[in-house]
Amino acid sequence: MIAKLERLKHEFETLEKRLADPELLKDQHRYQEVIQRYSDLKGIVGVYLEYAGVLRSLEDAEAFRNDPDLGDAAREEIAALEPRKASLERKLEGLLMPKDPFDDKNVIIEIRAAAGGDEASLFAAEVLSMYLKYAETLGFHTEVLDSHPTAVGGLSRVSFEIRGRGAYSRFKYESGVHRVQRVPRTEAQGRIHTSTITVAVLPEAEDVDVQLSSGDYRVDVFRSSGPGGQSVNTTDSAVRITYKPGTAEEIIVTCQDGKSQIKNKEKALTVLRARLLEREREKAAAEAREARLVQIGSGERSEKIRTYNFPQSRVTDHRIGYSSRNLNEIMLGRLQELTAALSEAEQSRRLDEVTTKLGSEGNPSPQAGGSP
């Protein structure tokens, strides 16, 4: 692992020098490539330098372990540094593990009201707002693609796009069933009801990811069913795409929130590609599970992942046992702490799986998982 880290450190220092060269700015494409790689390495190198400093301090302290005058102080320093060394080693192992190939992609999120009727639709609208606010704090761009309002001001379903490097890495843990427990505003007797919504998080697919032929789908146009009075309703601008090639399961995508039929068609095709990519990912994951291989992902979409308990102002993520009493803050889009906890848990799980696999193969060094 040290050899790989030294190579990355050398590459980082080389890139740092290149960025100081004004000639690089003349080639904007290359400049963006260099600055992106520099940014990717910066975090790893920063942790490695801290780790190297801890190793040097440990070496210095070890030299005085048996010194009659400084031995006690040296042993105290060693006792304090060893846990830090172990923590940094694990962090470096995680940073060196291969990234999810979709982490940097834009993302499409689909929210649907499930059990609970009007209350579920109201919560769907609140979760949409939560995600849009979170995306804004991250500097991402958002666009609602298709929405279906309910009479009470909720949403029966909605799909939207989040654009920005790393969008999928921030939102991928949201896939699944979200449960809300609270007293609905229509409840006269003050009883707590439980409702659910489903969230699907799809990495945006490019043409190279999904081969899509125009003969595989049918395009229909219709008038938007959105609120009256908007210009979006004055023409047949809404688009419905039906995908059913051969014996494959039918997929229907609608997009009606844009005013342009052409724009709506483009966005609907974007959603369709994302769904097709997700279908292939799920198929591959199922095959991997059957073959007892390492499963990469954030869990089954059908599982209940999180509960929002309003009477107790508590949010619980059931996958990692995370619990927070800051429900109001989370509903305002402050998901950073929760996302970090989920990311750390996923990293630990993958490290444990790699370590277990290496151990079963007789590899004496669990750190080898970080090597190429």
Image (spheres, rainbow, N blue to C red):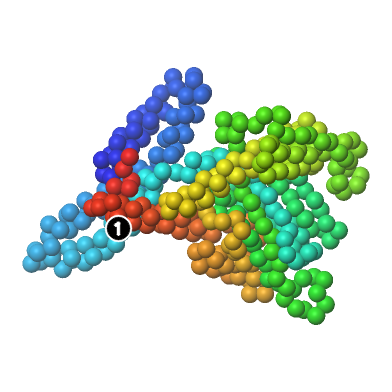
Q: Position of residue 361 (x, y in %)?
A: 28, 51
SS for tag 1?
Answer: helix
Pinpoint residue 35: horizontal percent, then vertical percent.
Answer: 46, 32
**Residue 207 shows in the view:** yes
Q: How dense is the environment of label 1, judged by Cα within 10 Å: few (below 14), some, or many (20 and up)?
A: few
Q: Kindly identify which residue carries mark 1.
A: 86
Residue placed most toward the observer, 201 or 79: 201
Residue positioned 56% across, 48% down in the render = 282
Count of residue discs: 1
Identify which residue is drawn at 77% across, 42% down. Answer: 254
Residue lying farthest front?
Answer: 247
Tell me if residue 262 comes above or below residue 155 in the rendering. Answer: above
Say above or below: 65 vs 256. Answer: below
Report the side of 245 relative to 80 (left or right): right
The residue at 52%/54% (across/down) is 298
Amino acid under disc 1: Ala
Counting from the top left corner in percent of width and height, residue 222 is at: 86, 39
In the picture, which quadrant includes the N terminus? top left
Residue 88 visible at all: no
